[in-house]
Amino acid sequence: MRIDVLIFGGGVAGLWLLDELVRSGYSAVLVESRALGAGQTVASQGILHGGLKYTLKGAFNNAAKEISQMPARWAEHLRGERKPDLSRVVMRSGYCHLWRTGSLSSRVGMVGARVGLAVKPIALEQSDWPEWLKHGAGEVYRLDEQVVSPPSLVRELAVPHLARTVHAPEPVKWIVAGEDVKSVRIGGVTFDPACVVLCAGEGNEALRNQLGKPSSLMQRRPRQMVLVHSTSGRNLQWVNGHCTDTSRTRLTITSDRDSMGRVVWQIGGAPSEDGPDWPPRKLIEHTSREVRACLPGVDLTGCEWATYHVNIAESATPTGLKPDGVFALREGNLVTAWPTKLALVPVMVERVMGMLDQPQPSSLEAHRQPELERALTQLPRPAFADPPWETISQWMTCP
Ligand SMILES: Cc1cc2nc3c(=O)[nH]c(=O)nc-3n(C[C@H](O)[C@H](O)[C@H](O)COP(=O)(O)OP(=O)(O)OC[C@H]3O[C@@H](n4cnc5c(N)ncnc54)[C@H](O)[C@@H]3O)c2cc1C
């Protein structure tokens, strides 16, 4: 079965690329080994960054410039003014709060945060501070970086193209000639793609190994994230933002609702970076102390806590630190890509589109389309991944 592009990986990157390809007249199919969104995407906090993390130390580098355009770009998609139309994506918040505690060291972070951001933090009068920041915050800003619900984003991107997605839990069979992938056998169907794009996040490493390509292109940065919800019948406050004491993000908290309608916090920032290998209880105790220090007005009585592990997968850098923007490399007819941030996916997709050959004339021939559709009906569709809080078997209390 001749097709233009075969994508591996149904996270936000692969799904956005599939949408772009189909709208541009390519015949494209996406292969997912687990469930749509299963890697970093549904585990992420969904903040459409404008570069805060890059500028906290006061530096305004290339990465900061690229990402500084992202909130405006996403806003067009979220308003439905630009394809893909994401106007039905569930929003966690239209903006983030940025605050520091009263401690002296916290001033350093705030100064850095104000430098070089296209989206400038706006200082809020005390009367406009949210209730949960009224006790103990030193300064509070509003940062116009939207926060989306990643599971909803995955659905909105995937649903129009489900018929072009394939669930392939087993390793696929490759036929390679020289630098090029000639054929890929999945279940009972053999695809002959003009181009293969690896958008499988951490899975890119194993896929590149299968293809005999050097895997040293990728690095992992492990994270252990903390989850908390209330069982007292009184919900946690709807918090979306960062406490930026010092030049690090001391805490990043985002809020969503679980299937029982309870508010659940995802907590990242310094604890998740410092404690990827800590026993969950140690990390939970440390994080709860941090939450009490950063949000002294919030009552955590009757809360239950849990953690989950996830690796950030991205292109390798000499220092092991965050890469300078998106990565895409073409070798023969194989493209390997990592967006680095969810917010940077539109840039990654443009980069990959610029590396592809024009659609084959055959893909525009109407008679080939039913043939592809028939072949795809022989293969199973992937399910949608559950968000992390729906997968926890045991929640803990914390003194
Ligand atoms: C805890 C955390 C919080 C984050 N928060 C933010 C944030 O607030 N804002 C932001 O901009 N970015 C954030 N990020 C980064 C962001 O989540 C990632 O950059 C983005 O989701 C990567 O998307 P992806 O599609 O490239 O990869 P993934 O989401 O990892 O998707 C890869 C997909 O490929 C599939 N796959 C793997 N192997 C194979 C195979 N062999 N064949 C087929 N499919 C395969 C996986 O099952 C998965 O579905 C966060 C990341 C983490 C870990």
Image (cartoon, grey):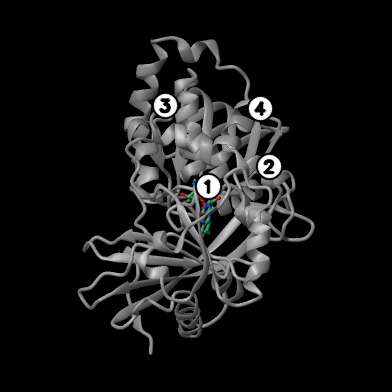
Disc 1 crowd, CA 10 A, few/some/many (<14, 14-19, 20+): many
- Amino acid at pointer 4: Met
Q: Which residue is mark 3?
A: 81
Q: Earlier in the sequence, mark 2 or mark 3?
A: 2
| Residue wearing tag 2 | 65
Q: Is residue 55 left or right of residue 8?
A: right
- Depth check: 22 or 70 in front? 70
**Whole-Å distance between the Cαs marked 4 and 1?**
20 Å
**Amino acid type shown at disc 1:** Leu
Q: Residue at x 42, y 54 (%)?
A: 42
Query: How far apart are the two marked residues, 3 and 1, measured between alpha carbons?
Result: 20 Å
Which quarter of the figure is the C terminus placed in?
A: bottom left
Q: In the structure shown, which secondary structural element does the residue marked by tag 3 occupy?
A: loop
Q: Which residue appears farthest toward the right when viewing the image? A: 318
- How would you rate the neighbour count of disc 4 (Cα within 10 Å): few for under 14, some for 14-19, many for 20 or more? some
Q: Amino acid at mark 3?
A: Glu
Density class for disc 3 (Cα within 10 Å; few <14, some 14-19, many ≥20) is: few
Q: How far is mark 2 from mark 1, CA to CA? A: 16 Å
Disc 4 secondary structure class: loop
Rendering quarter of residue 345: top right
Which badge, 2 or 1, is on the more N-terminal residue?
2
Cα–Cα gap, marks 2 and 3: 23 Å
Q: CA distance from mark 2 to mark 4?
A: 22 Å
* Residue hosting label 1: 342
Real-space Cα separation, disc 3 to disc 4, in angstroms: 26 Å
**Dot 2 alpha-carbon crowd within 10 angstroms: few under 14, some 14 to 19, many 20 or more:** some
The answer to whether residue 26 is above or below residue 346 is above
Residue type beneath disc 2: Lys
What residue is pinned by disc 4? Answer: 355
Q: Is residue 328 left or right of residue 281?
A: right
Residue 138 at x, y percent in the picture: 53, 71
